[in-house]
Amino acid sequence: MGVDITGAIDLHCHYGPDAHRERSVTALEAAVQARDAGHAGVLLKSHTEPTAQLARIVAEAVGGIDVYGGVCCDHEMGGLNPAAVETALELLGRVVWLPTLSSRQDVVNGVAAQLGIPGPGLTVIDDDGQLLPEVQEIAALCREHGAVLATGHISAREHAVVARELGSRQRVLVTHAMEDLVGPKLGVSELIELADLGAWIELCALTCVGALATRPVADLAGAADRIGPARCTLASDYGQAVNAAPVEGLQRFADQLADEGLSADAIRTMVVANPATLVAR
């Protein structure tokens, strides 16, 4: 019998239809499957479009589960665009992601080129290492609405600046920590520093479970133990056609973390309690 994650909230669920990628579930299927598994909520993420309005429609259609949305500050949304962020938050969006696949970091990684995304990529700091004015405005909007500011795929240096400037002032979430496929591949010591500055740390199934895994589960279990479950969240980051459905991926992740020695209480803290705290209004 697997770990009981009844009441889970997956804050990183991709869905289709998607203009550029084949997906394993539609938004409706993701919500229905999460509800039927006993989850309390699911957050729909898209790199190319805002999801707050869709989330409200899906929640009404499905019933019995909270469905959340947000917006990525990528090229498709006008980049670091406070107007797009404000609109998403007025529609009750709960997460704003700083640049993901449009980030300068993913241009450096080569990820953007693989997906046909033009360079030079977006950054959130200026040449002096200060947050750009538009990022300050976006952060202020998140504070005003009690929403999460997620780091997306920005560089390690940018993560440090965001956490230092904003971690003690609002909800900052370091997304898909330790991921090798995108972003800056942050190590455990860097994650501990970010958590000490007030950021929450998201650990995802995609990183270590399934067809796109690049690390052993033990790496993420060890990170959770060292950072402390009180500052971590668990999510799937699933929705890829090559992987299982997000609900199944999240359960496998929880079970394999337990196999590595994390307690059921620690796992529930990360997958139930902490995500609920982050999306609470």
Image (cartoon, grey):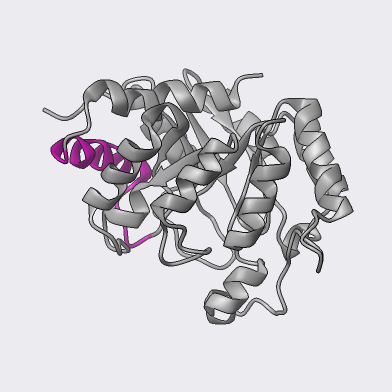
Is residue 115 something that shows in the picture?
no
Number of numbered discs on residues: 0
Is residue 208 something that shows in the picture?
yes
Snapshot quadrant of residue 139: top right
Q: Is residue 97 left or right of residue 236?
A: right
Snapshot quadrant of residue 157: bottom right
| Residue 31 percent across, percent down from the top left | 46, 33
In depth, the one of 215 and 20 nearer the eye is 215
Q: Is residue 251 left or right of residue 233?
A: left
Q: Residue sitting at 47 percent across and 47 percent down?
A: 191
Q: Residue sitting at 34 percent across and 47 percent down?
A: 245
In depth, the one of 127 and 260 nearer the eye is 127
Q: Which residues are magenta?
A: 241-260
| The C terminus - image quarter | top right
In depth, the one of 236 and 133 nearer the eye is 133
Q: Residue sitting at 61 percent across and 50 percent down?
A: 151
| The N terminus - image quarter | top left
Q: Vertically, is 156 above or below 3?
A: below
| Residue 11 percent across, percent down from the top left | 50, 37
Q: Residue sitting at 86 percent across and 52 percent down?
A: 134
148 is within the stretch colored magenta? no
